[in-house]
Image (cartoon, rainbow, N blue to C red):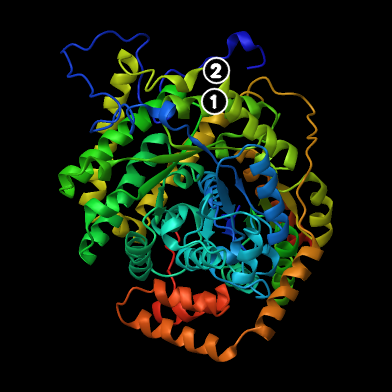
């Protein structure tokens, strides 16, 4: 495959859907899709789409220390970013403090360490939370971080009703793909419904969950699996809300989704169009939702991830740009464009800036956002949309037959389906059947990577631990004990735990202490060891 | 040759197991027996499993950047458990500059992000054959 003239491109989609060489009108006259903004929203969730509201440009960031993270946020906001996206380090995500011996290697590596409210205050220092929409990629400890966000807002004089943003809070995909689970499914789902209920009552502008397919994709799922597994997770969450007796018309309005946009442009566009239509049908048919606003598949996306290559990494700039184009043609609501060095390390300030500029060029120079659903009516795109909807529906029916998503996770079925696909894709790449530029075709012999590698600093770690020690020394121990005990009592019963969690964080309980209190009642997830 | 037994585990808190599982599948397809230990393994658990299962090699996968301290702890634990001669291979997002340090610690081979599955299989096979060869001589 050394000579480019002999490189064959693939004609079927990465999900294995055959494509015609050319599409013509369908054999039967299909009913026209309603215009954007009308159910089932195939063509978009708003009638005026990006003219009415441009997508949010939200770069995932967080590393080292609360101070360094706050500095990066201010830089990104000054560079024209329009929302924040918080990356937490692994101990904060799994409920360990920065001085825990089981967690010490991971402090500050892949995100910001948050031990107590004192850290959260620094992260948002000088950032008015009544004017900022903040997305937090947090799952196992999502309810704790939401409590902290509410508490920081209150210290700024901002009420819960005023806060906007999203916590990811999607534990099901963590069991399958991302691995930051803590408790078993049932208590985890109860905590999630607690946050959904709390937000519906107290923080109605805040999205309490972002049902994520992106991590399935990073784990190796194809676009079709991503769509089906994510909607199946969504079904599970809505079922649990229904069991709690929540008003589904009300909570439906605040559900949001999070996907990956990879390289096959038309597959991605079809995926988002099919996703909107299918979710609207699920909410209507399965759950009897009647308010169109509660059927919306509002989706934020990442461009990059496992579609980026370590080889010739600057090619990733081009990949991310095409992916962002696909996302906009697909009508998404927010975009995170990965930096080109992310296959190798955490992005530097320069590469993060270039990633943001990629979106800005798309938004302001290409003219693409000025027309809603510009590919609507294309025979090809409409047929692909129908196909992805049908195939995803078929997969969801399989999950239903297997007893739903929780059963499929506990048995390890979903995990195996995804890793089988990851393995298949890897073999296709290594055999050259699926060309990846710079990897298996057009390689650069003797390539040496010139990348600035992110390093954690021992000073950051020391400072983080010092602050934790100081908070522990200065806080009111009686209040800590009392709030943790109340939390445990609540956990044993069936009260909504959010008020207890807010009390705990206000008393400067640590994330580790709060999680341990809950671990004591809920236990831990028993991972199925399947490959 | 006796069937090769390999332990694949993720130490630390990182939950990205795609690489670990894909490599596990490749080793299995190459005729090896794979014991998969999943996520969040303590060094002691990995060492105990490696010795108890009498594996020929251990494969670790780390994508969070904590490969150096984790490799050190796992190797220490293996020595303590009496498995100090079991070759340990590590894969993940590992900067090239860290490879010499990992080798100095006693890591037998490093498989970076760009490694091919064939490389992984060949690396394990080479290390195991070397260990068995030495074992036969002594």
Going by the image, does A316 lie left or right of B73? left
Residue bearing mark 2: A366
Q: Is residue A244 visible?
A: yes
Residue A495 in the image: above or below residue A271: below
Q: Nearer the viewer, residue A13 or A489?
A: A489
For the point 52% across and 68% down, the residue is A151
Going by the image, does B24 lie left or right of A370? right
Q: Farthest residue to the front: give it.
A: A157
Q: Nearer the viewer, residue A506 or A171?
A: A506
Q: Position of residue A301 (x, y in %)?
A: 48, 39
Going by the image, does A267 lie left or right of B1? left
Task: Indicate the chain on which mark 2 is placed.
Answer: A
Name the disc covering residue A137, or none: none
Residue A446 in the image: above or below residue A32: below
Q: Position of residue A260 (x, y in %)?
A: 48, 38
Q: Is residue B93 visible?
A: no
Q: CA distance from mark 1 to mark 2?
A: 7 Å
Q: Position of residue A37 (x, y in %)?
A: 29, 30
Residue bearing mark 1: A363
Quadrant of the rendered image containing residue A116 = bottom right
Dot 2 falls on a residue whose secondary structure is: loop
Callout 1–callout 2 Cβ contact below 8 Å? yes
């Amino acid at each position: 495959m050394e000579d480019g003239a002999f490189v064959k491109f693939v004609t079927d989609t990465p999900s294995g859907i055959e494509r015609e060489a050319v599409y013509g009108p369908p054999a039967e006259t299909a009913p026209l899709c309603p215009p954007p903004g009308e159910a089932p929203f195939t063509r978009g969730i708003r009638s005026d789409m990006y003219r009415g509201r441009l997508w949010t440009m939200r770069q995932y960031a967080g590393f080292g220390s609360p101070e360094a993270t706050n500095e990066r946020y201010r830089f990104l906001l000054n560079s024209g970013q329009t929302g924040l996206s918080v990356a937490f380090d692994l101990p904060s995500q799994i409920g360990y403090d920065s001085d825990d011996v089981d967690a010490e290697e991971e402090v500050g590596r892949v995100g910001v360490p948050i031990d107590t409210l004192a850290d959260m205050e620094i992260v948002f220092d000088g950032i008015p939370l009544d004017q900022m929409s903040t997305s937090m990629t947090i799952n196992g400890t999502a309810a704790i971080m939401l409590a902290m966000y509410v508490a920081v807002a209150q210290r700024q004089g901002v009420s819960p009703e005023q806060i906007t943003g999203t916590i990811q809070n999607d534990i099901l995909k963590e069991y399958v793909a991302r691995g930051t689970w803590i408790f078993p499914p049932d208590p985890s789902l109860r905590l999630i419904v607690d946050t959904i209920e709390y937000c519906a009552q107290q923080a109605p502008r805040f999205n309490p969950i972002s049902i994520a397919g992106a991590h399935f994709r990073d784990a190796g799922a194809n676009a079709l699996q991503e769509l089906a597994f994510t909607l199946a997770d969504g079904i599970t969450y809505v079922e649990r809300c229904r069991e709690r007796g929540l008003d589904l018309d009300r909570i439906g309005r605040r559900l949001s989704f999070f996907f990956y946009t990879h390289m096959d442009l038309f597959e991605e566009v079809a995926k988002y169009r099919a996703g909107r239509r299918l979710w609207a049908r699920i909410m209507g048919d399965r759950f009897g939702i009647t308010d169109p606003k509660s059927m919306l598949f509002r989706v934020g996306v990442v461009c990059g991830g496992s579609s980026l290559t370590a080889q010739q990494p600057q090619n990733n700039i081009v990949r991310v740009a095409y992916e962002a184009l696909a996302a906009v043609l697909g009508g998404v609501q927010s975009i995170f464009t990965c930096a080109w060095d992310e296959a190798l390390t955490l992005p530097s300030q320069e590469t993060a800036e270039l990633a943001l500029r990629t979106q800005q060029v798309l938004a302001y120079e290409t003219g693409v956002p000025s027309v809603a659903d510009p590919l609507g009516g294309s025979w090809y795109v409409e047929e692909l949309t129908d196909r992805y909807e049908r195939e995803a529906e078929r997969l969801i029916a399989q999950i239903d037959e297997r007893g739903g998503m929780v059963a499929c996770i506990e048995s390890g079925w979903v995990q195996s389906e995804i890793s089988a696909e990851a393995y298949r894709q890897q073999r296709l790449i290594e055999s050259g059947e699926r060309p990846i530029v710079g990897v298996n075709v057009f390689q650069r012999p003797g390539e040496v990577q010139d990348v600035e590698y992110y390093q954690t600093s021992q000073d950051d770690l020391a400072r983080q631990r010092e602050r934790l020690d100081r908070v522990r020394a200065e806080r009111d121990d009686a209040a800590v004990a009392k709030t943790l005990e109340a939390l445990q009592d609540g956990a044993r019963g069936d009260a909504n735990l959010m008020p207890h969690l807010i009390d705990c964080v206000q008393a400067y309980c640590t994330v580790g202490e709060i999680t341990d209190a809950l671990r004591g009642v809920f236990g831990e997830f028993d991972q199925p060891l399947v490959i | 040759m006796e069937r090769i037994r390999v332990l694949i585990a993720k130490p630390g808190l990182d939950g990205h197991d795609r690489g670990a599982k894909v490599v596990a599948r490749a080793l299995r397809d190459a005729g090896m027996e794979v014991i998969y230990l999943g996520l969040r393994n303590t060094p002691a658990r990995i060492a105990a499993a490696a010795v108890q299962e009498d594996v020929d090699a251990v494969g670790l996968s780390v994508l969070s950047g904590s490969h150096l301290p984790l490799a050190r702890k796992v190797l220490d634990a293996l020595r303590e458990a009496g498995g100090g001669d079991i070759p340990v291979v590590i894969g993940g997002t590992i900067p090239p500059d860290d490879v010499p340090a990992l080798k100095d610690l006693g890591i037998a081979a490093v498989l970076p992000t760009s490694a091919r599955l064939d490389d992984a299989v060949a690396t394990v096979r080479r290390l195991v054959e070397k260990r068995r060869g030495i074992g036969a001589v002594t």
